[in-house]
Image (spheres, grey):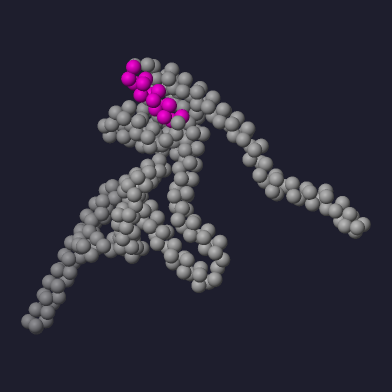
């Protein structure tokens, strides 16, 4: 009887300890979940959990990527790094992580050139195909990056008059410049709105409006936007009415956009000559002169 009572007491004690342990584990899990829910805060208990929280692909590729980044920073000229950083910044990429990724990809394409040459030589590919593929690996990343920068600048140049019109209307309605710019960003999404949002973020964190506008001008590199930034800075400096400045800038931007469209329209006939000479004219000559040439050959 005593043995049975002792066994029952032991089982009850173990059950109470298990219940208490489960309760504490759930409490810790609840605390960690609450802390994760607060602005993405994450809690790790040890180094192993910290490493396992990183995705598997990143853990596998991190050593190779770090090696390529070190090689790129060591052997890449400083001027190239600065120009590439400026291009990435104009595309909206901030921080060193995007620069490191581009350098790793750039070094990877250069390292892959000898491998591609050996593989294509083993496959007995033509010399022209090998040269073209190696040239694409050598200059392709920079060409793609420059093309994206040009496309983004063209988009900013195209949407700037519309944004200035809406900004002028908002300021004339009684809003302040920052409030009107915030309303305009919400109404017209795009690359220029993203840049203005970044500028507003700099102003709200304590930077002056003139400093933020100059940073925007240097970051984007569009002539029309530089003129707009200079006009706003001068209006703040000399106390000119910002409504008049915005209206004048909006009219000037619309005029420049119309002139740019006229210039592109005048260039169109010259650009059409190349496909016409090499693609359309030969087909016309075959249709027109072909039957006469056949008759002349039969008669002779």
Residue 231 on the magenta segment: yes
Is residue 190 visible in the rendered image? The answer is: no
Quadrant where the N terminus sits is bottom left
Is residue 78 placed above or below 110 in the rendered structure? above
Q: Residue 31 appears in which quarter of the rendering?
A: bottom left
Q: Position of residue 273 (x, y in %)?
A: 67, 41
Horizontal and vertical percent position of residue 104: 36, 56
Magenta stretch, main secondary structure, is: helix
> Which residue is the extreme one toward the left?
2
Residue 40: give x, y in percent of width and height: 29, 50
Tell me where the magenta segment starts and ends, as one range: 224-238
Q: Residue at image x 91%, y 58%?
A: 300
Foreground of the two, 283 or 235: 283
Q: Is residue 70 left or right of residue 134?
A: left
Above-or-below relation of 181 to 145: above
Is residue 227 rendered to the left or right of residue 209?
right
| Residue 153 visible in rendering | yes
Apparent side of residue 81 relative to residue 280 in the rendered image (left or right): left
Vertical side of 110 occupied by 244: above or below: above
């Amino acid at each position: 009887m005593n043995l049975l009572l002792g066994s029952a007491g032991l089982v009850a004690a173990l059950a109470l300890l298990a219940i208490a342990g489960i309760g504490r584990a759930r409490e810790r899990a609840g605390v960690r979940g609450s802390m994760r829910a607060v602005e993405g805060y994450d809690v790790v208990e040890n180094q192993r959990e910290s490493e396992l929280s990183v995705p598997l692909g990143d853990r596998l590729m991190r050593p190779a990527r770090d090696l390529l980044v070190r090689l790129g920073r060591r052997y890449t000229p400083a001027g190239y790094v600065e120009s590439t950083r400026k291009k990435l910044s104009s595309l909206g990429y901030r921080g060193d992580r995007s620069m490191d990724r581009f350098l790793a990809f750039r070094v990877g394409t250069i390292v892959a050139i000898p491998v591609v040459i050996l593989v294509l030589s083993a496959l007995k590919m033509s010399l022209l195909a090998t040269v073209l593929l190696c040239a694409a690996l050598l200059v392709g990343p920079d060409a793609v990056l420059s093309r994206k920068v040009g496309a983004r600048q063209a988009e900013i140049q195209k949407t700037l008059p519309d944004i200035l019109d809406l900004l002028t209307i908002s300021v004339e309605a009684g809003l302040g410049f920052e409030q009107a710019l915030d309303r305009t960003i919400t109404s017209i999404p795009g690359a220029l709105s993203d840049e203005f949002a970044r500028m507003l973020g700099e102003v709200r964190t304590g930077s002056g409006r003139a400093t933020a506008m100059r940073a925007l001008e240097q970051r984007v590199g569009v002539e029309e936007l530089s003129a707009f930034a200079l006009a706003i800075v001068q209006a703040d400096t000399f106390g000119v009415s910002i409504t008049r400045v915005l209206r004048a800038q909006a009219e000037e931007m619309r005029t420049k956009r119309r002139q740019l469209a006229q210039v592109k329209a005048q260039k169109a006939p010259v650009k059409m000559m190349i496909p016409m000479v090499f693609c359309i004219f030969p087909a016309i000559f075959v249709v027109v002169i072909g039957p006469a040439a056949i008759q002349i050959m039969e008669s002779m």
